[in-house]
Amino acid sequence: GPIILHSSEKSRASETADVIAMALQEEQWLDVTAHEELADGNTKTDSTTVIQHEELNEWNLGVLEGLTKEEALEKYHDDWNTFSEWADPLVSTEHAQTVIAEGEVLEAVRLRAVNCLENIVSSTKEEAADPTVVVSHGGLLGQLLRHVVVAQYPQDRQDAIRNDPASRDKLLKYHRPKNACITHFSID
């Protein structure tokens, strides 16, 4: 059957998804045909489709968008501190609920990412033997990794781990996401 990939609407992710789709076609010796852009922004060939999801877009950083680290620290110190926790699986509930000026709450990123992935997975249950390919962004991936902790530990246990240096160090030894990384999630 056709290969379906999912990406954010942002060009840096959707173009990467297109490249992955073409590589998967070639790997499977599929007939590669002309790339067609659909009216809704999704792309398709005879054997692949890239479906874009607004919910997979990067964290809206509001006033921090387009600034260098130095500029952000100088102009919006508190907002930068909130952003700097993007990949901390033990970020406090209070911090996860802090709004970046003109932007988005970290917790909202986690919830929209998880909801989108749950919808994708539930719609592809029949093809469960094949992996689902999703192309997104670092901030979103950081929140999916945080969700693994949130889903695994009740809040009081998260607080205990956060406050115990030995437990925290053990949990934080995972590799933080970087640009162009591949992360595998198994979903029960």
Image (tube, grey):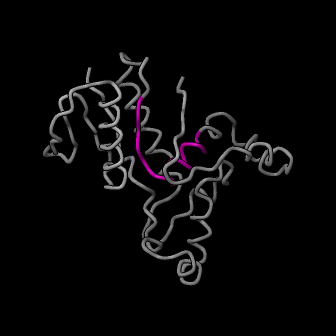
Give the residue displayed 17% in from the left and 29% down from the top.
Answer: 46
Q: Is residue 91 left or right of residue 118?
A: right
- The percent position of residue 112, horizontal first and vertical second, equals 43, 45
Vertical position of residue 160 compared to residue 68: above or below = above
151 in relation to 172, above or below? above
Which residues fall within the magenta stretch?
132-147
Magenta stretch: includes residue 153: no
In the image, 118 versus 127, the foreground residue is: 127
Judge from the rendering whether residue 114 lies leftward or rightward of residue 164; answer left or right: left
Near-viewer residue (38 or 181): 181
Q: Main secondary structure of the magenta part?
A: helix
In the figure, is residue 178 to the left or right of 53? right
Picture coordinates of residue 35, whole percent (x, y): 18, 41
Residue 152 lies, in percent from the top left, at 66, 33
Give the residue displayed 36% in from the left and 23% down from the top: 124
Res 184 → quadrant: top right
Q: Residue 84, located in which quarter of the rendered image?
A: bottom right
Q: In what quadrant of the picture does the C terminus appear? A: top right
Question: Which residue does the image show at 54% across and 32% down from the upper left?
Answer: 185
Depth check: give the residue in front, 92 or 171.
171
Q: Residue 1 location in percent, x, y?
A: 26, 19
Residue at the farthest bottom position: 74
User: 107 or 72, which lies in front?
Assistant: 72
Q: How many marks?
A: 0
Asked if residue 134 is among those painted magenta in the image, a careful observer would answer yes
